Image: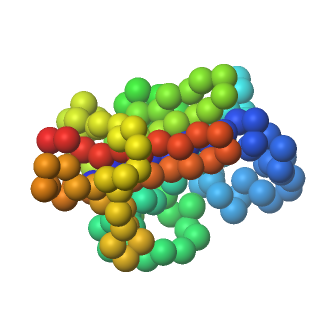
Amino acid sequence: MIGNDIVDLALAKNPSNWKRKGYLDKIFTVSEQLLIQKSTNQELAIWNLWSRKEAVYKIILQKGGNRGYYPTKIECLDLNLENGIVQFEKQIFHTKTIVTGDSVYSIAVENVSDIQNVKTLENSHLLFKVDGIPFISINNEVKNASKTHHGNFERIVYLDA
């Protein structure tokens, strides 16, 4: 299973109310808030954590988990970009995050070895959904996929293993 999420930083900056009292409590655990507070770039830390949580949420849905809003149940254990660890209930997920001047992009997988098998789909003509879950068909083989879009950015990924 794979999940991904991208944040367009220019778009995210405008409506962001993250400094408002109580805002972070609705989205981040106490441990995550400490990571944010200790960060030299708090706003970037927020979008790093958020994109990783969203990527993991997409895997949870692929596995039949409930749709809903429960960001504090998905917890990032670090701010690591290359080998991030995220936990949901007792399950561990592995993330890789790429930060540019324009975006924060995260990919999540269940098995750390799958990070090297992530492929990007350049166009969406192979993408289809079943019950809202994205898949692709390549060479008559159906594979789980994940699609993210925010502002000027879109990415579709799948595992080629």
Quadrant location of residue 33?
A: top right
Q: Is residue 148 above or below residue 100?
A: below
Q: Is residue 82 above or below residue 15?
A: above
Q: Is residue 84 above or below residue 156?
A: above
Quadrant location of residue 34?
A: top right
Residue 73, given in percent of the width and then of the height, sits at: 50, 63
Instruction: Say whether residue 114 is left or right of residue 26.
Output: left
Name which residue lies at 74% across and 44% down: 12
Name which residue lies at 39% across and 38% down: 122
Name which residue lies at 41% across and 34% down: 96
Q: Nearer the viewer, residue 109 or 23?
A: 109
**Quadrant location of the C terminus in the rendered image:** top left
Q: Can residue 121 be seen here?
A: yes
Instruction: Say whether residue 90 is left or right of residue 114.
Output: right
Name which residue lies at 37% across and 31% down: 83
Q: Nearer the viewer, residue 86 or 144?
A: 144
Residue 50, given in percent of the width and then of the height, sits at: 59, 48
Instruction: Say whether residue 113 is left or right of residue 133.
Output: left
Quadrant location of residue 114?
A: top left
